[in-house]
Every structure is written in structure tokens, then in C-alpha cells.
């Protein structure tokens, strides 16, 4: 009898496995694909020598994750690389607002009228990321927060929609930056708690930056897997779990899957029938003959570039995807890893990563709309394209069963689900089956490569394991 079986080797599944194995428990992981990593993989998607991240690329919540910071991942090959600027947000006149490690540089880039309001917003949280992240990202059932005052302050600022948070700013630059950061969850800017999403990304930049992993995002699950194996854990790949009976007997089964798949596999019937999935993304990975020719000098120095000039434009693009229309002018999240990581492309060449938002299950092609938007801010971009690999909702869903209809957030960020995922329950990692747990990004604190869902689920599971071991 194993202590635990984990279904799915994404960052959360591997983190759950590691947390149990390093406490002396026997753990085996079963992954459907032939490689581990889930949404943190690196592959030659276009041409030989061009190494692309098909899903996650930039890791503000990874470097700032309380779970990862407690693990010796650097010893297992993980190296964070920092661009000169975490993020730039260019405007049509060639200027840009920036998100810098420095609060001062960020504030100055918003213009004289908004530098003060920005400082006043973030000052109460400066130097407090570690405690705030632990309090925000832990399981709600785990007692009192370490710093309830800072957490309450964060809640007051962030629970309103980002459209409300933005009212403190006078000009478009700060508003566009906040709207762009909130757009990392695919929901209209009027949604509750979208302010908290934006604020989290801003504070993460000031605390630890928005780094990439040397060699590609695959380095993160590879480091987790290396540590897991050293702790005695075993990983099986090419093993799609269809029924609990496919698995060895265990005291706990921890699912890094969608709630829908968990219910089907564990025979829990309609347990998550009311769980809703959200919009999707249209992703393009480019092999380029040179760096992206941004008009803005700041964008040429940034790891991540957000493309969508105003809060209104960004809001419209998100609303379109949410309401079932493809956006005419998509808001783009882009990353240019080869600027600082020479392992990603042959010398002098570059990889470029971009996605825009589209409706769940959409089957169209957003390539032209994405490239028209890029050409506005980086004229000549198309001339540099050596090859491109595109993936819309059907391809994303085929890559990873967790992306139901291509929903890269594994569950819509709306209604009760915004705060209570996957359903209202005292401990969201448990299910009606006492030995079955959920650890994917369908649980708090949600999407991103941070392992915190896995960390929290492991804590719930090890109570059960201890009880049943006797
Ligand atoms: C296009 C895109 C861009 C993104 N960009 C970023 C980014 O820049 N930064 C960031 O932090 N996050 C980003 N994300 C989100 C991030 O990738 C996910 O939130 C994260 O990977 C979730 O981790 P997870 O372990 O919960 O699930 P996943 O990483 O999805 O892993 C789940 C694993 O379970 C396996 N599995 C599913 N069903 C079964 C089954 N029945 N049997 C066996 N195995 C199964 C899957 O094959 C997969 O390997 C992005 C995602 C996408 C798609």
C-alpha cells in the first residue's frame, strides 16, 4: 500500500508529491504525456535549435512562491534569469510605462500625476511579500494569517474590480498597466477581485521580479522531479489514468487534473457538475531572425511586453473573449526569453512567445489579428518571422486534458468560483471521497506555476495518510 498516488505531473502534482516524499511518505506519480511538466514544458516547436515554452514562460509567482522557496530547486538545476525590466507596456507614440523592480522607476513611468497615487497604493506592502504571499496563497482552513492587517489592507485594495482600483489614477499609462496585469486571468475588468490579480503581479515584480527559467520553463518541473526522485518518489509517464482501478492501492489519491476529470475517474458522479470553464487563448511561438523591433526602447529591454494601449482596449478584448467573440484587436501578452537566455535560439536568432484571448472552444485563426497588433508597436515584425507554431483552444486542449475547451485557467474566474474554487467547501482540496484530493489550479490560489495548490493539497492529504497509517 503506497501512501500517495498523484495523477498528473504538472507543477502542482509534482509539488504535492515532493511535499509528501520529503516527509518520508511513499509516492508515485502517473502522467498521461510522454514528458512531465504540464503547463511548464519546453519544446522545439518550430525549427531545430529554437526552444519554445508552449505554455508558461514568465514566473513572478514561481520565484515568489512560498512552496518553491522552501525547496532546494537550484540544486536540481533551476536558475532564474532576470531581464533588465520585468515588463514594459508600450503606447502608440513610442513611449512606454514600465514595471520595474524599483517602485520609483515604475511610478515615474506613469507620469507626474500618477506617481504619487501609485506609491501610496504599494507602500503598505513593500518588504512584506513573503508574509503576504503565504497568507494569500495558503489554504483558508489553516488558521489565522501571519499578518492579518496587511492581508486585510490587500483585500480592501484588491477585492474591487480593477476598473474601480484604476479610478485613483488620472492618466492612461497607469490604468493600462493595471488592466494588462489583471488580464492574466481572462475576465472582464469589471470582475470582482481583478484588482487583486493586478496588484499581486505588481508587488511580485517589486519583490522578486518576473524571471524566466534558464533553458526554458521545463527546468521547473525537472528540478521538482529530480528532488522527488532523490526522496524516493517514482514517476511514470505515458500513463493516462482513466479509473481509480488503474492505480496501485494507496492511502491518498491526489489529482492534478480538472475537477471534471477527477469526478469521472474517481466515480464521483455530478460532484463538480456546476463547475464552469472560462475563455481560452490563441498562442503563437515564433522563430525570428532578430529581436522584435519594438519602437519603444523600454520594450526592447523588457522580458515581458503587454500590447494594448488603453484600459478601454484591454477591457473590450477581454469582454469579447468572455462573451463568445474573437477580439478584433486582441490584448497581447508577449515574452522574449532569448534576449537573456542564449540556450533558447541559435546565435543571433530569437524565440518570441505571444498569446491573445479567445472564447472557450473557439476554432478560428487569430494569427493575422495578433500580427497586425504587433506591427503597430514593432513595425517590421513580420519580416523577421522564420517559422511560427500556432495553438488555439482545440490544440491547447489536445496538449493537456486540464484545459477544458482550451481554458488555460482550468476554471472561469467569475461568480462564486472567483474566491471559492472548485466549490464552496471548508477544505477545497478534499472531496466527498475521503481518500481523493484535488491539487490542480482549479483550487486556490489558482493558475500559475507556483506549486501552492499542490503544497496546500499535500497538507490536507498527509493528515489523512497519518490517520490511516495508524
Ligand atoms: C498558453 C499558456 C501560457 C501560460 N503562461 C503562464 C506564465 O507565463 N506564467 C505562469 O506562471 N503560468 C502560466 N500559465 C499557466 C500555468 O501553465 C498553469 O497554471 C500551471 O501549469 C498549472 O499547473 P498544474 O500542475 O495545476 O496543471 P498542469 O500544468 O496543467 O499539469 C497537469 C498535468 O496532469 C496531466 N494529466 C491530466 N489528466 C491526466 C490523467 N487522466 N492521467 C494522467 N495525467 C493527467 C497533464 O498531462 C498535465 O501534465 C500558462 C498557461 C498556458 C496554457
Image (tube, rainbow, N blue to C red):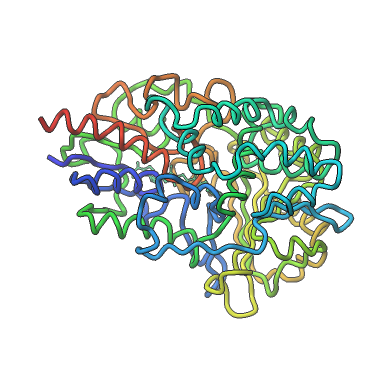
Picture coordinates of residue 432, whole percent (x, y): 30, 21
Q: Is residue 239 above or below residue 294?
A: above
Q: Count the numbered circles shown.
A: 0
**Residue found 49% across the figure and 43% down from its top:** 130
- Which is more toward the observer, 55 or 3? 3
**Residue found 68% across the figure and 54% down from its top:** 100
- Which is more toward the observer, 313 or 90? 90
**Residue found 86% across the figure and 53% down from its top:** 92
Picture coordinates of residue 381, whole percent (x, y): 76, 65
User: Farthest bottom residue?
Assistant: 347
Picture coordinates of residue 239, whole percent (x, y): 29, 49
Left or right, 433 with respect to 134, comes to left
User: Farthest left residue?
Assistant: 470
Residue 162: quarter of image: top right
Q: Quadrant of the N terminus?
A: top left
Q: Quadrant of the C terminus?
A: top left
**Residue found 71% across the figure and 51% down from its top:** 306
User: Farthest right residue?
Assistant: 93
Q: Is residue 468 above or below residue 293?
A: above
Left or right, 198 with respect to 36, comes to right
Picture coordinates of residue 107, whole percent (x, y): 76, 48
Left or right, 417 with respect to 386, comes to left
Residue 119: quarter of image: top right
Amino acid at each position: 500500500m503506497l501512501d500517495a498516488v498523484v495523477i498528473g505531473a504538472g507543477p502542482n502534482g509534482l509539488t504535492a508529491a515532493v511535499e509528501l516524499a520529503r516527509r518520508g511518505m511513499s509516492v508515485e506519480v502517473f502522467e498521461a504525456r510522454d514528458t512531465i511538466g504540464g503547463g511548464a514544458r519546453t519544446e522545439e516547436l518550430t525549427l531545430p535549435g529554437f526552444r519554445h515554452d508552449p505554455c508558461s514562460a514568465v514566473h513572478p509567482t514561481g520565484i515568489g512562491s512560498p512552496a518553491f522557496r522552501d525547496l532546494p530547486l537550484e540544486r536540481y538545476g533551476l536558475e532564474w534569469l532576470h531581464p533588465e525590466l520585468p515588463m514594459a507596456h508600450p503606447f502608440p507614440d513610442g513611449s512606454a510605462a514600465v514595471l520595474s523592480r524599483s517602485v520609483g522607476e515604475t511610478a515615474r513611468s506613469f507620469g507626474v500625476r500618477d506617481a504619487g497615487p501609485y506609491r501610496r497604493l504599494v507602500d503598505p506592502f513593500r518588504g512584506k511579500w513573503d508574509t503576504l504571499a503565504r497568507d494569500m496563497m495558503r489554504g483558508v482552513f489553516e488558521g489565522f494569517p501571519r499578518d492579518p492587517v496587511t492581508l486585510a489592507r490587500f483585500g480592501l485594495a484588491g477585492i474591487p474590480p480593477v476598473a474601480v482600483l484604476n479610478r485613483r489614477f488620472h492618466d492612461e499609462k497607469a490604468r493600462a498597466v493595471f488592466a494588462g496585469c489583471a488580464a492574466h486571468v481572462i475576465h472582464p475588468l469589471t470582475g470582482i477581485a481583478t484588482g487583486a490579480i493586478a496588484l499581486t503581479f505588481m508587488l511580485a515584480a517589486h519583490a522578486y521580479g518576473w524571471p524566466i527559467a534558464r533553458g526554458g520553463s521545463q527546468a521547473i518541473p525537472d528540478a521538482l522531479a529530480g528532488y522527488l526522485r532523490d526522496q524516493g518518489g517514482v514517476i511514470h509517464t505515458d500513463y493516462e489514468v482513466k479509473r481509480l482501478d488503474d492505480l496501485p492501492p494507496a492511502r491518498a489519491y491526489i489529482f492534478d487534473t480538472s475537477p471534471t476529470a477527477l469526478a469521472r475517474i474517481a466515480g464521483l458522479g455530478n460532484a463538480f457538475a456546476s463547475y464552469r470553464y472560462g475563455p481560452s487563448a490563441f498562442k503563437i511561438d515564433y522563430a525570428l531572425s532578430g529581436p522584435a523591433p519594438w519602437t519603444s526602447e523600454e520594450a526592447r529591454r523588457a522580458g515581458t511586453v503587454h500590447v494594448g494601449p488603453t484600459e478601454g482596449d484591454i477591457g473590450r478584448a477581454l469582454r469579447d473573449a468572455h462573451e463568445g467573440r474573437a477580439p478584433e484587436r486582441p490584448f497581447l501578452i508577449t515574452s522574449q526569453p532569448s534576449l537573456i537566455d542564449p540556450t533558447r535560439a541559435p546565435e543571433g536568432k530569437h524565440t518570441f512567445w505571444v498569446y491573445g484571448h479567445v472564447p472557450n472552444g473557439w476554432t478560428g485563426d487569430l494569427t493575422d489579428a495578433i500580427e497586425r497588433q504587433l506591427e503597430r508597436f514593432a513595425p517590421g515584425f513580420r519580416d523577421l518571422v522564420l517559422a511560427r507554431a500556432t495553438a488555439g483552444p482545440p490544440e491547447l486542449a489536445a496538449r493537456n486534458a486540464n484545459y477544458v475547451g482550451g481554458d488555460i485557467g482550468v476554471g472561469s474566474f467569475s461568480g462564486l468560483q472567483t474566491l471559492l474554487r472548485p466549490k464552496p467547501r471548508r477544505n477545497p482540496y478534499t472531496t466527498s471521497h475521503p481518500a481523493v484530493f484535488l491539487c490542480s489550479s482549479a483550487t486556490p490560489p489558482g493558475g500559475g506555476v507556483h506549486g501552492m495548490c499542490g503544497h496546500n493539497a499535500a497538507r490536507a492529504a498527509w493528515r489523512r495518510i497519518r490517520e490511516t497509517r495508524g
